[in-house]
Image (cartoon, helix red, strand yellow):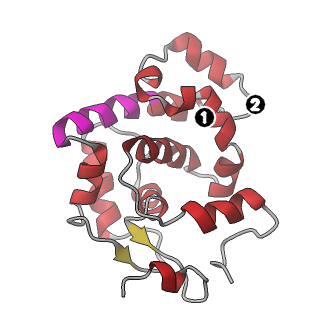
Amino acid sequence: MRCSWVNLENKKYVDYHDIEWARPSHNDKYLYEMLILESFQAGLSWEIVLNKRENFREAFSNFEIDEVIKFDEDKIEELLQNPGIIRHRLKIKSAINNSKIFKVIQSEFGSFSNYIWSFTDGEIIYENDKTTSQLSDKISKDLKKRGMKFVGSTIIYSYLQAIGVINSHEEDCFLYNKLVKK
């Protein structure tokens, strides 16, 4: 059995759950990609974003942050015409803005990984059935203070689950015993 939220009819979703979700990551390129993708999820389902992930990779220069930072109005207009991604002007502009702030955080902390994992002293949080927490509230508030957009507590909670800071595999899931702290 898998977590109850997994759409078993969608191979991408099943693979994401089985291979990627809730696995602790310290890779800044991955952490960046997931932060951008999660910000596009706001008001939508993760499955919609996941189904468009390859299109996002292509549209966002394979999530090469130094390229995304250079996106200008012409590029924004091009992205708004791309039916393969979520065409939302404010989310696209925030992705560019958030990329710049991500770089600042990398400079300040040595890596974004150092920053994000510092909130738990490198420890994984094991919890289920939540959409926000004091941790996601705190990180959301800090990212907003730094100027990021589309990083509310619910989005950040989902992000923390995706990158393995929070492990929310359900007890009936075949990954629960494999990834839960012994």
- The residue located at (46%, 46%) in the rendering is 30
Q: What element carries label 1?
A: helix
- The residue located at (63%, 78%) in the rendering is 3
- Choose mark 2 or mark 1, whichever is in front: 1
- The residue located at (24%, 51%) in the rendering is 114
- Give the label on residue 83, or none: 2
Q: What element carries label 2?
A: loop
Query: Are dots 2 and 1 in contact, CB under 8 Å?
Result: no
Query: Magenta stretch mostly in which secondary structure?
Result: helix
The residue beneath circle 1 is 57
- The residue located at (43%, 40%) in the rendering is 29
| Local crowd size for mark 1, using a 10 Å CA cut-off: few (<14), some (14–19), many (≥20) | some
- Image coordinates of residue 136 in percent, x first then y, are 34, 62
- Give the label on residue 116, or none: none
Q: Quadrant of the C terminus?
A: bottom left
Q: What residue type is labelled 1?
A: Arg
Label 2 to label 1: alpha-carbon separation: 14 Å
- Judge by depth and name the residue closer to the eye, 133 or 101: 101
Q: Which contiguous range is marked in magenta?
A: 96-109
- Image coordinates of residue 104 in percent, x first then y, are 25, 32
